[in-house]
Image (cartoon, rainbow, N blue to C red):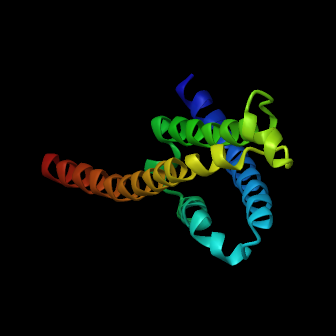
Amino acid sequence: MKKLLNGLFYFLKFLFYFSAFSLTLFIVVQMYQRLGKDIIDSFKIFIPYLLILILFVINLFARQKSVTQNIFYNITCTLVFVTIIVVGLRSMFDENMVLREQLGRNINFNFFDYFIPFMKIMLYGLSISNIFLMFTGKKKKKEIEVIAEQVL
């Protein structure tokens, strides 16, 4: 059962990652277009997404079992990306937000703008925990090998 849930959340992690990234990109492009800013200025918003993507690719090719088979990490990734998606969709489709109608863009940019620092914190937290899991998995493997050598 644990392997089945882990596989499900491992797959959902990638699906929700791309959904959260594309939704964030859409809202940020619309926000910067409304403000008349250059889209290059928004690069700092997408640095955590790039870092997570790099770590996901490293885990795929290096076959880091300490990361890919960690059910707690996969559930946490899924929850973080679902939170980003929910906030993005709420800023777009919640009709009870006053600023959504006043701006005329059908997106409440202020609501999403207030969420951006928290989004960065969650994404950087995922990156840091991914890096910790990568290195602690190797440490545990070495400890097991040392114990096995001592026994034999």
Instruction: Describe residue 11's horizontal placement relative to residue 133 as left or right.
Output: right
Q: Is residue 95 left or right of residue 147?
A: right
* Image coords of residue 12 (percent x, y): 68, 39
**45 in relation to 150, above or below:** below
The reply to whether residue 50 is in sight is: no
Hey, which residue is sitting farthest front in the picture?
Answer: 102
Say which residue appears at 28% left-offset and 50% top-offset: 140
Quadrant for residue 8, please give it: top right
- Image quadrant of residue 145? bottom left
Residue 83 visible in the picture: yes
Q: Tell me: residue 115, above or below residue 49.
A: above
Q: Quarter of the image containing the N terminus?
A: top right
Query: Which one is nearer the viewer's eye here, 50 or 149?
Result: 50
* Left or right, 34 with reference to 109: right
| Closer-to-camera residue (88/13) | 88
Q: Position of residue 72 (x, y in %)?
A: 46, 35
Please name the residue shown 78% across and 40% down the image.
Answer: 100
Query: Residue 95 is drawn in which quadrant?
Result: top right
**Vertical side of 152 occupied by 2: above or below:** above
User: Residue 144: where, in percent of width, then height?
Assistant: 25, 49
What residue do we see at 70% from left, 49% from top? 109
Residue 112: percent from left, percent from top: 65, 47
Q: Is residue 51 left or right of residue 132?
A: right
Q: Residue at x 61, y 51 (%)?
A: 113
Along the viewing direction, whichever of 101 and 151 lies nearer the viewer: 101
